Image (tube, grey):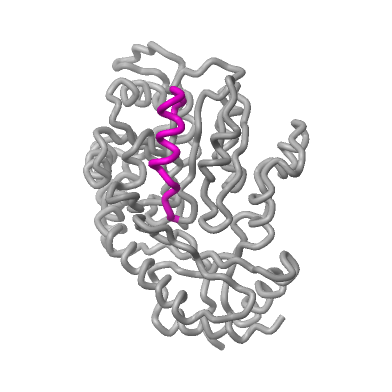
Amino acid sequence: MREFIPIARPVIGDDEIAAAADVLRSGMLAQGEAVRLFEEEFAEYLGAKNAIAVSNGTAALDLALRALRLEPGGEVISPAFTFIATANCALFQGLRPAFADVDPRTFNIDPDDLLERITPKTRAVIAVHLYGQPFDVRAVQEICGERGIALIEDCAQAHGAEFMGRKAGSFSTGCFSFYPTKNMTTGEGGMVTTDDDALAERLRLLRSHGDAGKYNHIILGYNYRMTNLQGAIGRVQLGKLEQFTARRIANAAVLNREIRADGLTTPFCMDGVRHVYHQYVLRVEDDAPARRERLMQFLQSRGIGSAVHYPKAVYEQPLYREMGYEKGICPASEDVARRVLSLPVHPSLSESDLHRIAETVNSFEG
């Protein structure tokens, strides 16, 4: 029986194990020197002045929005097609999530639609570099900058992605996740990046109970700290990120070249960007979503994992329906949610795995 090919697999080697063992032997398991060094190295890699390590990607979004000190009741616009945490962080801060539609080719926020969604209540925009492809940063920055609206980059899937030669997360406040399926991992973990020193200081206070040192708590804060274990693993993973990224890009190129099935569209990549393929996402053009479900079952029966990221627009989730959000707000988001299908693209795939994935997709007749 052929080995099952999972949709995602963290790449953990002896270096990560040794780094974790060193921390365990040191006895300093909470936030410490390994975290500080990870922050410095991540900021340098990104080209940002500050990096603040936190416990996970959702905490990164929550802190980034909290640090802006926006008055409750305002609106925060995010794309309707994303993981729910992008929008939920507004609720935690007493703000109202609002939604902009996406470009049906890139699946990223559509700047023209964003412009139409801005109201006098708009206080911030959280734009997502979905699947590892940067959104149109120049257009979104211009829209926000001209109106005094804060911009947060959700970079949870975009470690090492670039727009016009600059890395995602270096344009404004960036929020990263290091969940096991991401392009690099610390098990759980996150990072907030910013060039604003004052904002960085607030983020550090908020991360750890508002403690300015020696139990001097000057603001209300959280416990969103990263552990030294995570920091040590993160440093090793960061050193391998470019290698991981090169493999993902090469793997995507093989799939692009070899998948030729009717009614399936391979990923579109914008000019001037570096797409790092956190996910390799097909569009199912015909009879969606039923044909997508049949294809998933077909792949599973032949030992290949696949997944849907994501099956609904955020406001279609029960949580948001109960708050009064209705279908039809963002038609393109609802449509792509019926069509997208993620295939394996992770760095541990062999050439044989890639050929097998493409051949299996091409043989599907359903």
Say if residue 357 shows up in the picture.
no
Q: Is residue 357 above or below residue 313?
A: below
Residue drawn at x 50%, y 18% is 70
Residue 144 in magenta stretch: yes
Looking at the magenta stretch, what is its main secondary structure?
Answer: helix
In this view, the residue in front, 151 or 357, is: 151
In percent of the image, x 51 and y 75: which residue is there? 5
Total marks in image: 0
Judged left or right of residue 262, residue 228 is left
Q: For residue 151: magenta?
A: no
Nearest the eye: 277 or 26? 277
Image side of residue 204 versus residue 126, left or right: left
User: Percent x, y for residue 298?
Assistant: 67, 79
- Image position, residue 151 (x, y; %): 44, 32
Quarter of the image with the C terminus is bottom right
The answer to whether residue 111 is above or below residue 210 is: below
- Measured as percent of width and height from the top left, residue 149 is found at 46, 25
> As drawn, is 219 to the left or to the right of 312?
left
Q: Residue at 42% of width from left, 74% of height from top?
A: 349
Among the 4 quarters of the image, the one containing residue 133: bottom left
The span picked out in magenta is 132-150
Q: Position of residue 297 (x, y in %)?
A: 69, 75
Question: Residue drawn 45% across and 48% down?
Answer: 135
